[in-house]
Amino acid sequence: MTTTTVQQTLRQQVLVLYLASSALDSRVVGWSTYDGTGETSPTTGDSDEPPYGTGLDALKDGWRLFQAAQLLPPQPGHEYDVSFLKHEFFFEKLV
Amino acid sequence: MPHPHRKNLLTSVQMAHFVATGAFRMDAVVPDEMNREAIDVLKAGIPGVPYGTPLSEAFEGSAFVQKLVQLPEIAGAIHSLVGPEPTVDHHAVHIRKANEGEAQNLHGDAIIDVRPDAFDIQLMYYPQEVTLEMGGTLSVPGSHLRKTNESDTGRYQNLLGQTRLTCPPGTVVFLHHGIWHGGRRNDSDIDRYMFKIRFNPTVRQVRLWNTDDLYDDQVAAELGQYFPWYENATGRLEIYNRVKLWQALTGDDTYDPDYWVTRVSNRPQRVVSQRSLNPHAAKKEMA
C-alpha cells in the first residue's frame, strides 16, 4: 500500500482596520489590505467603501484578529496632539 | 506683485474652510487657452528656482507660470493664505504615467512640521480634466494638523471620506503643508500632469484675507466640522487644534465657539477669603 502526502502551502491575507474607538465593534474609519497570494494588488486610494462596517463584522466573516493597538496614555505635555490613528486592528486569513 | 483686489481675496468662511480641511479648491479657474498650452510647457520643463526666491522674481524665466500666479483669483488666494511677496520654496512637474501600476504612499511633504501659527501652502494646478481612472491626487480632509513624519502614514491605504480628486481642466487646489496626500495609480491610457509650487510666508499670517465676514455663523460651522475618518475622541482634539490655529490667524484668542479650548484652559487665580475656607476658624467664633 502506498500513501501520497499533499503538501499545502498556506498564504496569509492581512486586513488592517482602523476603528472609531478602542472597541472592536466600533465603526471602521480606515482600512488596508495585503494579499499574500499575489492574486490582488490593493493599494493607496483604491476604494471609498470600507470592506466592513465594524471590526466585529470582519470576525463574523472569518477574519482572525491577531493584533490590537495598545491603549497608551498621552505623553505629558502632548495631551492635545493628534498624530497616527490610534485604534488599529490586524486580522488575517490563511488561504 | 501688485496687491490683489479685495474682491479676489478669500472670505473668512473660505479661510475657515481651509483651516478645517487643509485645502481650498478652485475649479476651472485657469482659462482654457492656458490649459491648452500647459502640457507642452510642462513637458519642456519649468526652469529651477533657488529655495526662498521671492515670488515676483522666481518665474522671470517662465511667462506661463508668471501668468498663472498672477491670475486674479489665484493671486488673491495666495495673498489670503500666505500674504504679500511670499517666497517660492520649490516647484515641480508631477507626471503620473498612463497605466503605470503604482500609487504613492500616503504622505506629508518635506518633514514633520508642527508650526502652530504659520504654514506653507502648495498650489497644485491640473491643466487636464482628471477622471477617477487617471489617478487624481488622493488627499485626506482635516489631516493637516496630525503630527506625523512624511511617509510614516504609508500603511493607511484608504480613509473614510478621503478625497480622490476628479476635476475639470484648469483646476487649482491649495493645500496646507501638512495634509496627507499621494498620487493615485493611473489606470487610464492618458498621462496625467500636475504642476506644484510650494510657497513660504514672509509675514505673520494674521487677517490677510477679506475679513468682512469674520464673525459670520458659517465660520464656526466650518471650524466645527468632523470628518468621517476621525476617531470619536481624537476628532474632538482636531477641533481644539483647529480653533487654536484660527485664533492665531485672526489674532483673537477669545474665539472658541464650542468652548473646547476655553474649558481646559480655565485655571482661575482668585483666592477666596481664608475665613470661609477654614472650618476651624468658624468654630472658634462660635465658642
Image (cartoon, coloured by chain):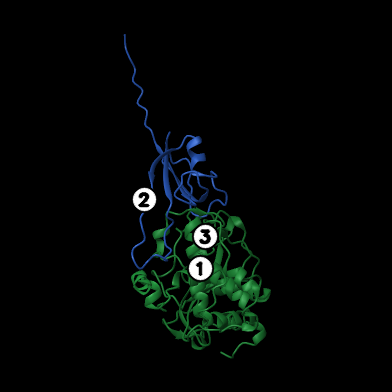
Chain colours: A blue, B green
Q: Earlier in the sequence, mark 3 or mark 1?
A: 3
Does the CB distance between marks 1 and 2 fall below 8 Å? no
Between marks 1 and 2, how big is the CA–CA gap? Answer: 26 Å
- Is residue B126 in view from this perspective? no
Callout 1: chain: B
Label drawn at residue A70: 2
Instruction: Provide the secondary structure element on which disc 2 rests.
Output: loop
User: Where residue A44 sits in the image (x, y, percent)?
Assistant: 49, 54
The quadrant where residue A86 appears: bottom left
Q: Residue at x 57, y 52 (%)?
A: A48
Q: Residue at x 57, y 81 (%)?
A: B80
The crowding category of the residue bearing disc 2, from other C-alpha atoms within 10 Å (few below 14, some 14 to 19, many at least 20), is few
- Answer yes or no: are tags 1 and 2 on the same subunit: no
Look at mark 1 in the image and give the residue it sits on. B260
Which residue, as the protein is rendered here, is positioned at the far front?
Answer: B287
Label drawn at residue B24: none
Between marks 3 and 1, how big is the CA–CA gap? Answer: 46 Å
Amino acid type at circle 3 is Lys
Callout 3: chain: B
Does the CB distance between marks 3 and 1 fall below 8 Å? no
Look at mark 3 in the image and give the residue it sits on. B97
Q: Nearer the viewer, mark 1 or mark 2?
A: 1
B240 or B52: nearer the viewer: B240
* Residue B120 left/right relative to B163: left
Q: Residue at x 44, y 72 (%)?
A: B265
Number of labelled discs? 3
